[in-house]
Image (cartoon, rainbow, N blue to C red):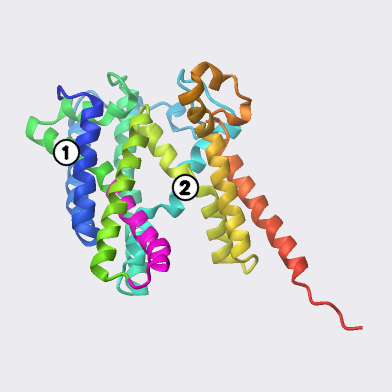
Amino acid sequence: MTTLDLATCLAIATVVIVAYAAIGGLFRDVITDIVQGSILISGLVVLLIAVLASNDFSFANIVPEQLSFVALDDTGAPVSLLATLNTWMIPVVGSLVVQEAISRFLGATSVSVARTGCCLAAGLYLVIGSIPVIIGLLGAAAGFVPDGWSDQFLPQLAQQHLEPVLYVIVLGALVSANPSTVDTTLLAISAIATRNLVEPMAPNLSQESRVRVGRVITALTGIAAFATAASGESIQGLVVIASSFGSAGIVVALMFGLHSTLGDERTVVAALLTGLAMSFFGNGVVSWGYSLFAGEEAAAALPWLFQANDESSYVLAVLAALVAYLGVALVTARGARPVAAE
């Protein structure tokens, strides 16, 4: 589709996203999401109609094995129960604390607006999210196999069954969906860093200076995001890392905060740090960093604890964060017991 290499495309995308996020802010980001989302939804509906109208696809060709909840490996063989649980927990549990949703309802004008928006978004997510699932089932049943990575399934299918103009619009919406998510994350990191780090250190900083500092933080975060994207092997792999890295402790703390009075700030910090540490080990960050200095062979010789664990890393991270939360809660509860008067 283009003669530019991947590194050049990533660099151009990084410059555009950072510039837009720094200048536009959250309000313009929301407007962009509405426009892009509308185009993407319309494109998916048109693609579904084109697929259903084609004689190449039929619901009768879908086999029961396609409807199984058991995850498959690269060869198509079913994986273990633990690996299947890990595969499902990443998008389901990890999505509970995604910044895209939290930043939207925290920015709502009232509680009722936030509640209504969340309910409407959940329903829309289920309805619209079922469209690519249906297309994927029909395409796989018909034997459609994309050239290259599996991430190319939907774009290549659209290229075959849509008119050139519609294909360009749908592809543009698909491509722009990822940058839209990234700029929201950049803005969230910038806001949190400015509020919790910059303002306590420089309380007399003017509003204009805070905005400038926030833009600098956005740019630095964009550079870090570029490095992360450049190190990934596929879009799916990057999405998995984004949903799982560090979110285990947040999920545990959120569930206890919403549904229990057990714990305090110390238990939350324990869960967060434990979940973050498990993410470093489970996603192979330690071995990857070691390979930069000692080479890949030396990194591969490290103990299993330091290697990437795609089979159970997120499950173990959530369990470890849960144990840390409960452990610190029990210790602090015992220490807080009043001493009986003699």
What residue sits right under mark 1 in the picture? 172
Compared with 239, 64 (above or below) is above
The answer to whether mark 1 and mark 2 are in CB contact below 8 A is: no
Q: Characterize the magenta stretch by its predominant secondary structure.
A: helix
Residue 238 picture location, percent across and down: 38, 35
Compared with 295, 116 (above or below) is below
- Mark 1 secondary-structure assignment: helix
Asked if residue 122 shows in the view, the reply is no
119 or 183, nearer to the observer: 183
- The residue drawn where x is 56% and y is 28% is 307
Asked if residue 244 shows in the view, the reply is yes
Q: Quadrant of the N terminus?
A: top left
214 or 92, nearer to the observer: 214
Residue 221 picture location, percent across and down: 33, 47
What residue sits right under mark 2 in the picture? 94
Q: In the drawing, does residue 209 fall left or right of residue 260?
A: left
Q: Quadrant of the C terminus?
A: bottom right
What span is colored magenta in the figure? 181-204
Question: In the rendered structure, does residue 54 fall within the stretch colored magenta?
Answer: no
Q: In the drawing, does residue 279 fall left or right of residue 163?
A: right
Compared with 138, 201 (above or below) is below
- Mark 2 secondary-structure assignment: helix
119 or 66, nearer to the observer: 119
Residue 27 picture location, percent across and down: 22, 62
N-terminal-most mark, 1 or 2: 2
Q: Amino acid at mark 2?
A: Gly
The quarter holding residue 332 reads bottom right
Mark 2 surroundings: few (<14), some (14-19) or many (≥20) residues within 10 A: many
Q: Amino acid at mark 1?
A: Gly
